[in-house]
Image (cartoon, rainbow, N blue to C red):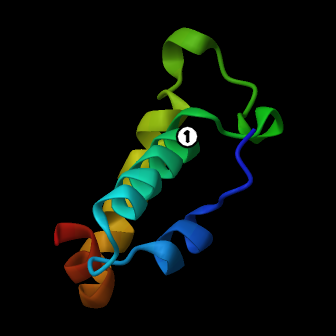
Amino acid sequence: MSAWDLTALVNAANARAGQADRHLWLVRLMEWLRHAPRGSVAAVPDEARTPLPVLRLRHLLNQIEKNDALRAEVQA
């Protein structure tokens, strides 16, 4: 399980960081998207449920859409 949450990732986004740091941020973002806590899924049949990484990606994109400063950091 990743120690990063969305708030920490948003705060760590830095367009002025070096290439290695930006790549590390992307790795952490992918870990966050793929490895959600096990207890965070409702008891719904697998075929009827939207995969949790997709829900997390939607949430991230909504946050980027609402927050101009975050959008600038992520786009750069």
Most distant residue in the right direction:
39
Give whichever of 32, 38 is nearer the camera: 32
Q: Which x, y percent locates residue 33?
A: 50, 42
Q: The disc labelled 1 sits on which kind of residue? A: Glu
Give whichever of 49, 40 is nearer the camera: 40
Q: Which residue is mark 1?
A: 31
Q: Which x, y percent locates residue 46?
A: 59, 13
Q: Which x, y percent locates residue 47?
A: 51, 10
Q: How many marks on residues?
A: 1
In the image: residue 38, left or right of residue 68: right
In the image: residue 51, left or right of residue 39: left
Residue at the (75%, 38%) spot, across then down? 1
**Circle 1 SS class:** helix
Most distant residue in the bottom direction:
69
Categorize mark 1 by other alpha carbons within 10 Å: few (<14), some (14-19), many (20+). Answer: some
The quarter of the rendered structure image containing the C terminus is bottom left
Q: Is residue 25 above or below residue 37?
A: below
Residue at the (57%, 46%) spot, across then down? 32
In the image: residue 66, left or right of residue 44: left
Q: Which x, y percent locates residue 14?
A: 36, 78
The quadrant in which residue 18 appears is bottom left
Residue at the (51%, 18%) spot, across then down? 48
Q: Is residue 1 above or below residue 28?
A: above
In the image: residue 45, left or right of residue 42: left
Most distant residue in the left direction:
76
Give whichever of 45, 53 is nearer the camera: 53
